[in-house]
Amino acid sequence: MCRKLFVLLLIGGLIGCATAPQTEVVKADQFLHDEAYSGFEQIPVETEQQVFQLDQAVTNYLDNNILILDKPVDRMNQLSDQLFSPNKVNLLYQTDANSVASQTFSSKTANCLSMSILAYSMAKYVGLNVVFQDVTIPEFWNLRDDVNFLNGHVNLFITAKTPVNEGQAYSIDSIEVDFSNSFASSRFQKNWISKQTALAMFYNNIGAEALVAKDFNRAYAYFRQSLLTDPDYVSGLSNLGVLYRMSGHNDWAEQTYLAGLELEKDNRNILDNMVVLFEHTGRIEQANDIRSRINKQRQSNPYYHYFLGQQEYQSGHWQKAIQHFRKAKSLNQYDHHFYFGLAKAYFELGKVDETRRNLNLAKRYAVDQQQSNQYLTKLALLH
């Protein structure tokens, strides 16, 4: 089994879990320790204006392609379509594309958060009403360089208010903007979140990437700004606690985790990190108690079994990985990740026919054309 160094919450994956809004109880200053990260203040952290600001290239595009439409509903629909149209903005998904609005437009790559930030600013510019949404989907992890990332997911809810007569009557139309229509489905609960919370998520993402690179000062600068921006963003507290533990401040880590649990007592991201902390500090019985409790709760979650399969795969245990990926598939037969996991494990065992069969299934259930094309390329390499 590969080593589990820490668990980070990263907003931007195509699947994730959400946190309901909470009443503020956290006072950010209590959990900040500037003295331990000398020089962090020299690291430039983007301001709110810099994150959401549209440069002239974006406003020119909107002036020439969206604002030429008179009806708000037409502006809304065209904005949504053009974001992903190959002949227009053509945004492509990239997990680690944590960028400000104008940079996202220029690079044409985004994760769900950077896409939502760009689309939010564009919608505001063309006179639409818009709000961020935190989408509640089962826990889903990515394992990268011995780091477990628990992904989160956000999208946008846009409304257009169009007069229907000379009086006070209006037609209200709405749309959800997302990389995949499956996440705009009504089967997933959504919580409206403020612009400040979305901004805190942005800082949290960059801090998480810095922490993976063990750039502790940069990580602290961004986690600090995330906490100051939204003190009640629970996953921001969790990641700040991870930084404290990684940099040798176990007491601060525990205090920060406990503050997060005051906001959300069953937050599994924090509970996972409490397990790591307790193991690190020799409190094995407490760690095992928490692990047993949360693992029982996760048995019906296919993404938990997928995560276990990833761990076994990384450790070179191909047959055990297959068992976990099969369990994940039995709980949800429509997710391409599970078939791709099986394809990789079968390939390592030299079972080319099974590899090809599962790659074809992964392609069938891919969430978008970009992902489907990637599987098609892998299939071609098998011939």
Image: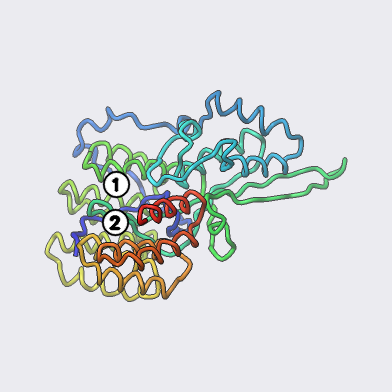
Image spot of residue 183 (x, y percent): 53, 57
Q: Which residue is found at the position 15% from the left and 69% from the top?
A: 284
Q: Which residue is found at the position 71% from the left and 50% from the top?
A: 173
Q: Residue furthest left?
A: 282
Q: Quadrant of residue 203?
A: top left
Q: Nearer the viewer, residue 6 or 372?
A: 372
Q: Which residue is mark 1?
A: 30
Q: Earlier in the sequence, mark 1 or mark 2?
A: 1
Q: Is residue 351 left or right of residue 59?
A: left
Q: Nearer the viewer, residue 91 or 140?
A: 91
Q: Is residue 325 visible?
A: yes
Q: Is residue 197 visible?
A: no
Q: Secondary structure at mark 1?
A: helix
Image spot of residue 295 (x, y percent): 30, 72
Tag nearer the camera, 1 or 2:
2
Q: Secondary structure at mark 2?
A: strand
Q: Is residue 268 above or below residue 38?
A: below
Q: Can you tell which mark lies on residue 260?
A: none
Q: Quadrant of the C terminus?
A: bottom left
Q: Which residue is mark 2?
A: 143
What's the amino acid at mark 1?
A: Gln
Q: Quadrant of the N terminus?
A: bottom left
Q: Residue furthest right?
A: 166
Q: Which residue is found at the position 62% from the left and 33% from the top?
A: 125
Q: Which residue is found at the position 24% from the left and 55% from the top?
A: 6
What's the amino acid at mark 2?
A: Leu
